[in-house]
Amino acid sequence: MARKRATANVAPQTTAQQLGSLIKSARDIMRKDKGLSGDLDRLPMLTWIMFLKFLDDHERLADAGAKIAGKQYKSAIARPYRWRDWAAQKDGITGKELIAFVDQDEAVRPDGKRGAGLLAYLRDLESTNGDKRRDVVATVFQGVVNRMISGYLLRDVINLVDGIHFDSTDEIHTLGHLYESMLREMRDAAGDSGEFYTPRPVVKFMVAVTNPQLGETILDPACGTGGFLAESFNHLLKQCQTIQQRKTLHEKTIFGGEAKPLPYLLCQMNLLLHGLDSPNIAYGNSLATKITDIGYREQVDVILTNPPFGGEEEAGIKNNFPADMQTSETALLFLQLIMRRLKQPERNNGKPGRAAVVVPNGTLFGDGVCARIKAKLLTQYNLHTIVRLPNGVFVPYTPIPTNLLFFDRSGSTDAIWYYELPLPEGRKNYTKTKPIQFEEFAHCIEWYTAKKRKENDHAWRVSASDVLKYDDAGNLVSCNLDLKNPNSANALEHLPPQQLVADILKKEQRIIQIMEEIKAELGSSA
C-alpha cells in the first residue's frame, strides 16, 4: 500500500512577502557582480531598473485609458527604449550586447538599428507641450551609472523585476514599504553621514497637525526620499472631489528640492508610487540661491521638512546669507531659508505661511549666530509650539535629541507652548527594533488641536520675553529655547544650581507660611 506524502499546511505568501522575496533574489544576484561593491551600489542599480519598469506599467495603463476615451496617448519614452521593447522578453538582449546598449553613448539597439544607448537617450529627453514627464525622467537619469559588469547577471535581475506588476494598487503601496526597509539597510551599511530619514510616525504627526489644505502650496526644501511630500499628497488627496481639484493637486501643489542623486531618484520613485504624476522636485542644493533674491513667487503656504543637521556648508553657500547670520551649520541655514520662503499674510489674503521643522537640540540652546536666528524667529515670526521628542526617535541613525518647531508668519511670538512627548510606560528610550509609533502622538494631537490649550504634566507655556535676554545697551545676550518641563517629576534634576536653591527656599518659605496659618487657626479656636 502506497504511503501518502505528508503535506505541510503552509499559508500562501502575501503580496509583501512575494515582493520581498523577489527583491531579495535580485539583490542576491547583484552580489555576484564584481562591479558592485556593496549595498550603496546595489540599491541605486535596483532603483533605476525598477523605475523604468514602473514607468512602463504606468504608461500602459494611461494608454489603455486614453484609447477608451478615444484619445491618443504619447509615451514619455519612445521605442525601442520602453521597458516592453528591450526588457520584458526573458530571452531578450543579454550579455555584452545588453551592457553596450545600456552603457554606451551609441550602440546597436534591440531593434537592430544603431542609435543612442539607453542611459544616454534617457538623459537627453526633453518635454514638449507642457508635459513634464520627459524632464522628470531626464533629471532622474542625469546621475545614474550602470556599475554591473556582467550582462548575464543584469538580465537575471531585469527578469526578476519584470515580475513586479505596478498596475496593482496593492503592489505599489507594498513596494513603498519595501523601499523604506531597503533605505534602512542602506543607512546601516553607510553609517552616520549627517542625514537621517524621518520615521513615518513623526512625518504623519507633523502633517496631521499642520493640516495642509487643497489649494495651498507645500514645500520640503531638503526632501530626501520624499516622505513629507508623499504624506502631504495622501492628506490632500482625501480632500479632492473634482477633476480640477485633482489637476491642481498634481500640478500646482507639491514641491521639493534634493541635492544628492540617490535620494533624488528615490524621491521621484516614491512620489510616482504614491500616484503623483509629475513631481516638482528640483535637483540641487536649495541653499544655493541668495536668500535676499527669494521673492513672493518662491514663497509657499506650508513647509514640512527635516533638514540635514551636523553637516557643514562651503563658503559659497554661506555667502548667500546676511553677514551676521552666516554659519557653516546646515540646519541653521535651512532654518533661515524656511523662514524666508513662507508667505506673508499681507500678500496672501491675510493667510500666513506656516512651517513644521525637525531640529536638533543644539539649535535650541545655541549661542552666537544661532541665538540671532532664533531672536529673529521670535520677533518676526510666531513660534507657537515646540514638541520635544523622547530619546531614541532617530535610532539607529543618531542618538541626538530632536525637537519639532511649529511657527508661522502671523506676527511676533507672544508665548511658546511646549509639549514633551513621553516615552511609553516602562521604556527608557526607543530602539531599532522598538521604534516610535504614530498612536503615541494621540494625546499630543488632541492637545495641539484643542480650541484652548491647557497646561498638563506634559505641556507648559513660556513667555517669549523670558527667553530673549538683552544687556543694558539692548544687545542680544542669549536666546535659550532648551527649557525643561517644569511639571515633570524629575524636573528638579535639570535645573541650574542657583534656580534649584531658589526653588527650595521658595518652597520652605511657603511651608513656614502654611505652618504659621495653621498655628494662627489653632490659637483662635482655643
Image (spheres, rainbow, N blue to C red):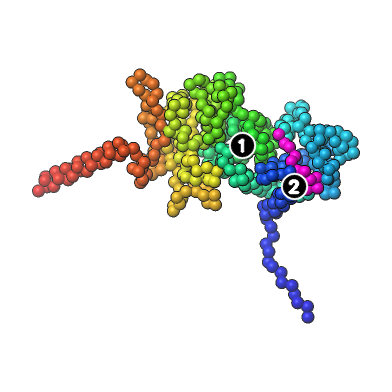
Q: Is residue 250 above or below residue 11?
A: above
Q: Which residues are magenta?
A: 143-155
Which is nearer the N-term, disc 2 or disc 1? 2
The crowding category of the residue bearing disc 1, from other C-alpha atoms within 10 Å (few below 14, some 14 to 19, many at least 20), is many
| Residue located at (52% from left, 30% from top) | 329
Distance from label 2 to label 1 (Cα)? 28 Å
Q: Nearer the viewer, residue 398 or 425?
A: 398
- Give the structural element (helix, strand or loop) at label 1: loop
Side of 357 where 99 appears, left or right: right
Side of 330 where 371 appears, left or right: left
In x, y percent, where is residue 447?
45, 41
| Residue located at (73% from left, 48% from top) | 30
Is residue 283 visible to us here? yes
Residue at which label 1 appears: 224
The crowding category of the residue bearing disc 2, from other C-alpha atoms within 10 Å (few below 14, some 14 to 19, many at least 20), is some
Is residue 164 visible to us here? no
Residue at which label 2 appears: 33
Q: Nearer the viewer, residue 301 or 323?
A: 323
- Give the structural element (helix, strand or loop) at label 2: loop
Q: Quadrant of residue 467?
A: top left
Amino acid type at mark 2: Asp
In x, y percent, where is residue 514?
20, 43
In x, y percent, where is residue 149?
77, 43
